[in-house]
Amino acid sequence: MTATARTGLSCARVEHTVLQSRGDGQGRLGQGGAGSGRAAPAPAAAADTNGGMRLFVAIEPPDQVLTELSAAAGRLRPAAAELRWTRPQSWHLTLAFLGEVDERVLPDLSIRLERAARRHPPQRLSIAGAGAFPSATRGRVLWAGIRADRQSLAALADSVAAGARRSGAPPPDEGRRYHPHLTLARCREPTDLTELAADLAGFAGSTWTASEISLITSYLGAEPRYTELQRWPLGAGARGQ
């Protein structure tokens, strides 16, 4: 019996963010056809929800990296079925969560995020390790960690947050220490996730170069989903380095 099989998890069903438009075999973003992988950004008007939208800025790992993590996490899911697991197509590295944003802010927000992206180089990243928020013994979120030049990645996140603030969309958690991660599962009630985190602690995925950032809107509801609005290259137009 694995360590996770012995874990008594008593989690209630909890709402989680699923990139419905990315996932379920239909490409990771937008309405690209089968096998398209990454679709063109949606026009900003598509995100209109009574003048406001929930936004965040993120880095998307490539499919190969997500497949590796999915294989590792998938081995734990049968023994922890009561956790609300997020789908691999929804996994992303958040740089800044902006919350509810008036769509009139979008033009200035776009300009400032583009400037922020240009000021920072592409990021060499890999997924490694795991943990839980707020603690492993009383966890509500199971996450996979990110291996990176922490100073460089944190500087990028700070620039994104500052640009959002100056455009009129201040991140509600700005000022907190940046902790890069991918959310794997959620639970409404505090749960001991120590053994699950330990089972994933040794995971180390392939390294990739993140060459762009994306502005994404989330739609809440019975089937929450995300749609990419825009993306910008990191560095002086550097791609695929």
Image (cartoon, rainbow, N blue to C red):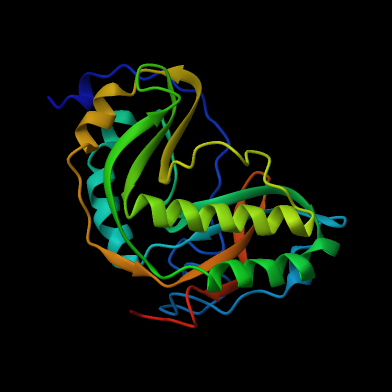
Q: Is residue 175 above or below residue 1?
A: below
Residue 167: percent from left, percent from top: 77, 59
Toward the viewer: 49 or 158?
A: 158
Residue at the image position 22 percent from the left and 41 percent from the top? 75
User: Residue 135 at what x, y percent from top left?
Assistant: 40, 22
- The residue depicted at 41 percent of the width and 18 percent of the height is 191
Classify residue 237 as left or right of residue 193: right
Q: Residue at x 25, y 63 (%)?
A: 207
Please give left or right for residue 135 compared with residue 107 in the image.
Answer: left
Relative to residue 220, is residue 101 drawn left or right? Answer: right
Residue at the (67%, 59%) spot, across then down: 163
Q: Is 68 rendered above or below residue 232?
A: above
From the viewer's side, name the closer residue of 63 and 76.
Answer: 63
Q: Quadrant of residue 42?
A: bottom right
**Vertically, is 154 above or below 81?**
below
Check the picture and name the quadrant holding the N terminus: top left
User: Image quadrant for the C terminus?
Assistant: bottom left
Q: Position of residue 214 (x, y in %)?
A: 56, 66
